[in-house]
Image (tube, rainbow, N blue to C red):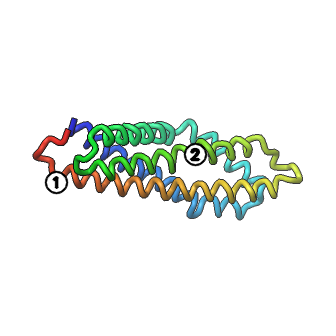
Amino acid sequence: MHEIVTALLWFSAIGCAVMGGVYFAFSAFIMAALGRIDHPAGIDAMKAINTDILKSLFMPLFFGTSAASLALVALAVLHWGVEGTGPMFAGGVVYFVGMFVVTVVFNVPLNDALEAADPKHPSSWSDWKRYASNWTMWNHVRTAASIAACTLFIFALTAWSERSIYPIF
């Protein structure tokens, strides 16, 4: 079981780091760049990104890291008190709620509304500004949650490495 937990922690830490990097890129410069071009082009570009991301390696990592995080939460609860289970539990909760739930509850509905938007409609400028502002705000949450979870999983891995000669589970 020790090897399984260690593998899940490594996968989750790396997955959270990659996901955090993707979200950081959107928060730091992609959305700003899309906001500087003509809004019909920005809308069309974001629609294209949203379409392509569903067919990319992003999706297996998105779901895989979410599932691994939930598994780590369950393992932490089952073995509460073992060194490293606190940050393992916290990392899983922070990631799942701050990344997965936020994505499903906030970012995906915003993307769905954007998909239905007509970039040539008179209200499209205000719709785009509202979309970009709200989407980016929730993306900041996903960025912070991914980075925080990665950090917590690294703390949990540190506890594992310090006790690597002793079976933990």
| Left or right: 125 as drawn, with respect to 31 | right
What kind of residue is marked 1? Glu
- Farthest residue in the right direction? 122
Give x and y (percent) for residue 90. Answer: 38, 51
Check the image and report above or below for 80 versus 37: above
Earlier in the chain: of badge 1 and badge 2, it is 2
- Farthest residue in the front direction? 81
Give x and y (percent) for residue 30. Answer: 60, 59
Front position in the image: 44 or 85: 85
| Left or right: 22 as drawn, with respect to 52 | left
Q: Mark 2, residues whose alpha carbon is within 10 Å: few (<14), some, or many (≥20)? A: some
Give x and y (percent) for residue 116. Answer: 77, 40
Name the residue at 74% across, 57% down. Answer: 130
Q: CA distance from mark 1 to mark 2?
A: 35 Å
Quarter of the image with the C terminus is top left
Quarter of the image with the N terminus is top left
Give x and y (percent) for residue 96. Answer: 47, 45
Q: Secondary structure at mark 2?
A: helix
Count of marks placed on residues? 2
| Left or right: 155 as drawn, with respect to 56 | left
Name the residue at 81% across, 57% down. Answer: 125
What kind of residue is marked 2? Thr
Which numbered disc covers residue 162?
Answer: 1
Residue holding disc 2: 103
Front position in the image: 38 or 157: 157
Q: Secondary structure at mark 1?
A: helix
Residue 162's image quarter? bottom left
Q: Mark 1, residues whose alpha carbon is within 10 Å: few (<14), some, or many (≥20)? A: few
